[in-house]
Image (spheres, rainbow, N blue to C red):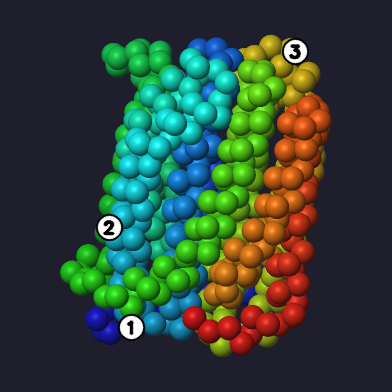
Amino acid sequence: MTNLNSNLHLQVETGSKQILRIALPISAAIIVPQINFITNNIFLGGLGQKELGIAGITGVYYLLFAVIGNGLNSGLQALISRKAGENNIDEIGVLFWHGVRIALVFALLGIVLTWFIAPSVLRWSLHDAEGVKMAINFLYIRILGLPILYIYQMRNALLVGTNQSKYLIFGTATEAIINIVLDYGFIYGKLGLPQLGFNGAAYASIIAELSGLIAVFGVIKLMGISKQLQLFNKISYQKKYFKLILNQSYPLILQHTISIMSWEYFYILIEHHGARDLAISNTMRNLFGFFGCFTWAFAATTNTMVSNVIGQGKKEEVLPLIYRILKWSVGFAVSVFLLLNISPRTFLSIYGQGDDFIIAAIPIVQIVSVAMVLMSIAVVWVNAVTGTGNSKMNLYTEMATIVFYLVYVYIALEKLNMSISWGWLSEWVYWSVMFIPSYWYIKSNRWKSYVI
């Protein structure tokens, strides 16, 4: 194994060129699933405003399970990046396959919970009986794609953690093309496919994710990465790696889960305000997801580069690296802010909901665009903490933030029955509070004594 890997060098530099070399392919890979989400909603919006609103509920519900995988992905990525920084290549494949095993267990639990628990929760929390039935039937199908999604996310951890993020685009491009074609075919009964209506988006997404997964593993094998990292060697279960990955990932899983559960609660409160407000909020989630891709790419870059640099023993370079990434992250966010505020109608008109919808949504776009700038600052510091290995600090930060967030949205939307503009101001609260403890922890230098 040593001879096979002798020419493989995975340690990163800390200049802007290296930052962009990692971040831009990640942003391209992240943006494709967001295109899939938006495509789903555009086609579903053609069925009616109710379908567009329910798509928001089901989308956030599925996102809840997606971020569990993302938490596992972030923890595994930090571990793989640390091994890459140490040039300890032999352990990377071992970590990857143990991560896949854990992910599949989580996927099975997610399917069971959705089939047996989610219907009761949705019936209790939503007011529209017809909408509840639509959401349940959709989720029964969509959740079957969870094992595919989780393996997909473990693949992301492998490629980003080993500084090979450029290969992400092959899988995500395949997924996007197939998803758009099948959305059109299944939802409307075109291209010789059966007309499945609202549920057609679920089938399209599952098939598209499977196609993307097959494509990227094909590229990994074709480019010789699997041979270099010994990915397809038989790797036996070893308890120490299982424990290491879970110990690193469980705080991040809890952090992301708590965050999205609070967002699902937010959408439930919005649903109480009516179908139009719910539909508007769903489009905001799409905008947030699509234009936030650059921010999340720099967040993932921060995680992997900080961990890699620490693995190299260059702790003194961590803070300058964070500020360098921060400049790029904020720069992209400000560009998005200007774009959204110069021509908000352009983005809102693609949903085909008419002028009243657009007029009501424009003030929310303005609020969301400011939130994106705040997010671009906060996520860099939060993911710097992840890169140091102290994922429990992330969990404590999330828990404190959620308290402020939930109190705010409950008072604004339910108690005082204020407009959804006031509800969306909760994003300002969320990202401001997330930033403070993460910034303090990195600046305090406490992370320098933390060992994983």
The amino acid marked with disc number 2 is: Leu
Q: Residue at x 44, y 53 (%)?
A: 69
Q: Is residue 36 above or below residue 348?
A: below
Q: Residues within 10 Å of mark 3 (few under 14, many from 20)?
A: few
In the displayed structure image, the side of residue 26 where residue 155 appears, left or right:
left
The amino acid marked with disc number 1 is: Ser
Please name whichever residue, 437 or 100, is drawn nearer the observer in this view of the structure.
437
Q: Residue at x 35, y 56 (%)?
A: 103
Q: Residues within 10 Å of mark 2 (few under 14, many from 20)?
A: few
Look at the numbered disc 1 and give the secondary structure of its residue. loop
Observer able to see residue 369: no
Give the position of the N terminus as an image quadrant: bottom left
C-alpha separation, residue under disc 1 versus residue under disc 2: 19 Å
Percent x, y of residue 156: 43, 57
Residue 435 image label: none
Residue wearing tag 1: 6
Q: Residue at x 35, y 36 (%)?
A: 116
Residue wearing tag 3: 356
Look at the numbered disc 2 and give the secondary structure of its residue. helix
C-alpha separation, residue under disc 3 versus residue under disc 2: 52 Å
Look at the numbered disc 3 and give the secondary structure of its residue. helix
Q: Is residue 177 above or below residue 155?
A: above
Residue wearing tag 2: 222
Q: Residue 223's image quarter?
A: bottom left
C-alpha separation, residue under disc 1 versus residue under disc 3: 63 Å
Q: Residues within 10 Å of mark 1 (few under 14, many from 20)?
A: few
The amino acid marked with disc number 3 is: Asp
Percent x, y of residue 216: 34, 51
In the displayed structure image, the side of residue 66 where residue 15 appears, left or right:
right
Q: Is residue 411 above or below residue 90?
A: above
